[in-house]
Image (cartoon, helix red, strand yellow):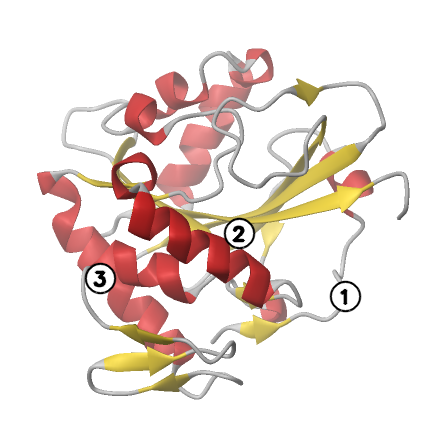
Amino acid sequence: MIRNIIDLPYDPVEQAACVLPGIGPVGDEGWLWRTPDYEAQMAERRARLDQQETDVLAVLPEGVAAAQELFEVVIDGLRGADGFQVGDDDVLCPDGVRVPLGDPLGTIGRLVQADMCVLQRPDGSDEHLLVAAVVCFPANWRLADKIGRPLTAIHDPVPEYAGEIAKRVQRLFDGVQVGRPLWRVNGLSYHEPHLFQPSGKLISDAPAPYFRSERQVVMRLPKTRAVVFSIHSFVFNQETS
């Protein structure tokens, strides 16, 4: 079930400083959140999907079944969730928008704030591949450049990811268990506050003006055994916070 979050139950700057990959169990917090900026974020997400779907949504043939399963998991999680009314053909959202139940990832992208990446490890492959995704709020990457690629290529050119970190992340994706999602936080300073920044100008060391934090959850789907990597993004003005 989606959880309403009034105040973040963690310090994003402090949490982002943890050594990679910095993973912990989700526990009672829930893997999906609705935060006070829901209305504003969802307006942008829906606009991105309506106006530039090819930039923010992609599903490979091998990812269709997992995308459908993720859709079912999300819809089940919204049933009875505060502010959501799930019907046979649509969902009435907390901001008053009624979203038709249609394309799995397109629908998810119009319902919840978190971006969703679906990864599978084909037989004989050393790594999970990105087989489906809805990413309305990219941070310095483009979905078209990452879809169909393995984890190491997805994280290129992040220098911290190479070597032992890449091995640890792959072990994490191999080992995450159904019903036991895991989470971590990252964070970087940016010049601009925009959530859609496929080629944003970041400042890795400077403390200002904006700090972007992503709450990332890794979970396994029970039927397809695909791994879902969800990303809930927050942007803070460090000069006024």
Residue at the limit of the structure toward the left, as seen here: 61
Residue 138, x across and y down, in percent:
48, 35
Badge 3 is on which residue? 69
Rounded to the nearest angstrom, the CA distance separating label 3 from label 1 is 31 Å
Q: Nearer the viewer, residue 182 or 149?
A: 149
Q: Residue at x 54, y 18 (%)?
A: 161
Q: Amino acid at mark 1?
A: Asp
Residue 160, x across and y down, in percent:
60, 16
Residue contact between numbered discs 3 and 1, judged by CB atoms under 8 Å: no
Above or below, comparing residue 158 to residue 238 in the picture:
above
Determine whether the residue tagged by mark 3 lies in a helix, strand or loop: helix
Above or below, comparing residue 82 to residue 163 in the picture:
below
Determine whether the residue tagged by mark 2 lies in a helix, strand or loop: strand
Q: Quadrant of residue 61?
A: top left
Above or below, comparing residue 95 to residue 31 in the picture:
below
Badge 2 is on which residue? 182
> Going by the image, does 229 lie left or right of 20?
left
Q: Residue at x 40, y 43 (%)?
A: 135
Residue 7 got which mark? 1
Q: Amino acid at mark 3?
A: Glu
Q: Quadrant of residue 178?
A: bottom left
Determine whether the residue tagged by mark 1 lies in a helix, strand or loop: loop
Local packing at callout 1 (Cα closer than 10 Å; few below 14, some 14-19, many 20+) is few
Total number of numbered discs in the rendering: 3
Rounded to the nearest angstrom, the CA distance separating label 2 from label 3 is 19 Å
Q: Reading the chain from its start, which is encountered first: label 2 or label 3?
A: 3
